[in-house]
Image (tube, rainbow, N blue to C red):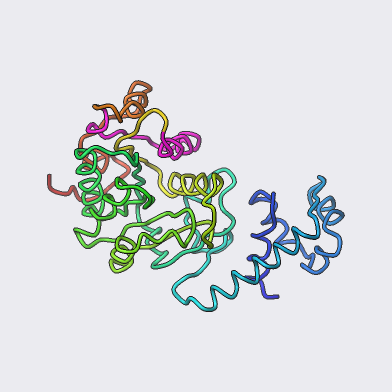
Amino acid sequence: MNQRDRKLFISYLPNLCSYERIVLDESPISIRQFMQNVSKTFVELFNRPYYVSKSTIALVLANFSRCKRYLSEHADTGVIFFQEDAYPALLREIYDPPFRLFYRGSPQVSNNRLMSIVGTRYASASALEAAFRSGSEVSSAGCVPVSGCSNTIEQYIHMGAVAVKRPSLVVLEDMHQTYHRIIDLVLDNDGCLFSEYLFDGTCDAEQVSSKHRIIAGLSDSIMLIQSPKQSPALEAIRYSLDEGRDVYVHRTGTTGIQSAGCRFLASEGARVVFSMNQIIDQVYWQSVRCPL
């Protein structure tokens, strides 16, 4: 088993944080030795109990083999591990970052200045217009917009980047969450897809949470276009606040029945802006101002 296969196998072990996966990967213990006495090895490394049943180990082996086969058959899909240079720098700084990232497209776009943008799936027409304009403005300024692709606001953000023929970065629940037309357009413009998970499945709460954690972690700033007080988009905002990242609210999203989340964030001190240019003009974004 080569080093990348070792990392891939370790990434499928359940109930480990990224730190534990890194330590296990960098230890001199072979995977065969680890598998022969999982509990003893884990206590020696981390001084805490760790138990996995034989059926769980069988599942880990099956997922590892399935993933290896998939990657060998799909040249357009790859994987980046935490210790590798291609891993996004800001994402590496968050609490318990993903040990692995599957990707399609051009992962080097994450080396650019990134701006995360999120919003509700129940968006007003004006919020959709704001999402499209925000994606265009960020891209025109030489930055890369980051968002999901599971609701209309997220899709309009990427369409804004496509409109100015610039790349964007799509974060998915898993790599089979392919919203085909928009995904194809993003990839045609040298964009990229990221996900911590490879295979389509139940799209459970852990996968959704991982998506928002990555969206928040990739950028030092995040914009909320529109959101009610209870919305999955607010999970990305919470992650950003936990990591000390800058949070902005689009003014369009502060009015209407679907905007209670934006109004709450504004009342708590989030800066309300009407144009992405107001963020791009910050001193830490030394970019050319795009036209209004």
Q: How many marks?
A: 0
Q: Residue at x 80, y 55 (%)?
A: 53
Question: Which is nearer the eye, 110 or 254?
Answer: 254
Instruction: Tell me, yes or no, whether the highlighted magenta stretch contains residue 247.
Output: yes
In the rendered view, does 158 fall on the left or right side of 56?
A: left
In the rendered view, does 171 fall on the left or right side of 119?
A: right
x then y, percent, for residue 222: 36, 41
Q: Residue at x 24, y 59 (%)?
A: 162
| Residue farthest along the left direction in this orientation | 292
x then y, percent, for residue 101: 52, 60
x then y, percent, for residue 262: 33, 29
Q: Residue at x 34, y 28 (%)?
A: 270
Q: Residue at x 77, y 59 (%)?
A: 55
Give the quarter of the image for residue 122.
Answer: top left
User: Which residue range is magenta in the image?
Assistant: 231-254
Question: Which is nearer the eye, 126 or 31?
Answer: 126
Q: Is residue 189 above or below residue 46?
A: below
Q: Is residue 250 above or below residue 15?
A: above
Give the quarter of the image for residue 279.
Answer: top left
Work out which quarter of the rendered image holds the C terminus and state it: top left
Instruction: Tell me, yes or no, whether the highlighted magenta stretch contains residue 76.
Output: no
Work out which quarter of the rendered image holds the N terminus and state it: bottom right
x then y, percent, for residue 7: 65, 65
| Residue farthest along the front direction in this orientation | 202
